[in-house]
Amino acid sequence: MSKIYAVRSYYDADLGALVELSDDVLGIVSQVRELYDDKVSIQLDPLTGWFHFVEHSQDGTDRLIFSVEELDGRALRRLQEADSHMRGHVDPYDALEREQDEDQARLDAAYRDQIREAGERLAHELKRSGMDDRLPLSAPVRRKRAKS
């Protein structure tokens, strides 16, 4: 794969050819270069013609971010959205779902306590009346802690 540079035309030794970039491709490559410097590059796969966004780590490891068949503004937006998770971006749908999960957990805890108390009283009454010999006569009663 050959790295695409932010110049209109250049010679690529791997391809053995002169590479000329269209205005759209040049614009995207330039913007990626401005935003990410040498941390992210766009590489062209000569066999498939796909563009690969590659992250270059400080330890020398290269990681594929994603690949696209067409290099346009959507690819740049996708890169920025992927990076926004690292920059503290909050997905509104994810935040709403977490809030709903927390509300549901509170409701479940409240109902669990009500059912536990009723169940303990029921078990104690069944045992006391002799309707079920297998149940223990005493049932632990949980005390509510004072809120501080």
Image (cartoon, rainbow, N blue to C red):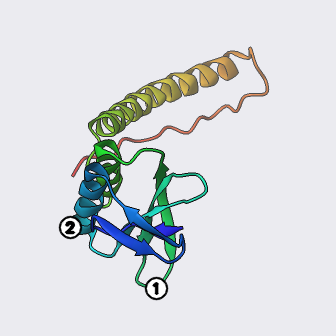
Q: Is residue 6 above or below residue 138?
A: below
Which numbered marker is on residue 59? 1
Which numbered marker is on residue 34? 2
Local secondary structure at mark 2? helix
Where residue 2 appears, x then y in whole percent? Answer: 49, 69
Q: Is residue 134 above or below residue 64?
A: above
Residue 105 visible at all: yes
Front residue of 112/49: it is: 49
Closer to us: mark 1 or mark 2? 2
> Rounded to the nearest whole Å, what is the CA distance between mark 1 and mark 2?
22 Å
Where residue 143 appears, x then y in whole percent? Answer: 40, 42
Mark 2 burial class by Cα count in 10 Å: few <14, some 14-19, many 20+ = few
| Residue drawn where x is 39% and y is 66% of the image | 4
Where residue 96 appears, x then y in whole percent? Answer: 30, 33
Q: Quadrant of residue 140?
A: top right
- Relative to residue 14, is residue 108 drawn left or right? left
Q: Quadrant of residue 54?
A: bottom left
Three-letter code for the amino acid on which mark 1 is drawn: Asp
- Relative to residue 134, is residue 58 drawn left or right? left
Where residue 75 appears, x then y in whole percent? Answer: 35, 47
Asked if the residues shown at circle 1 and circle 2 are in contact, with their CB atoms under 8 angstroms apart, the answer is no
| Residue most extreme to the bottom | 59
Three-letter code for the amino acid on which mark 2 is drawn: Glu
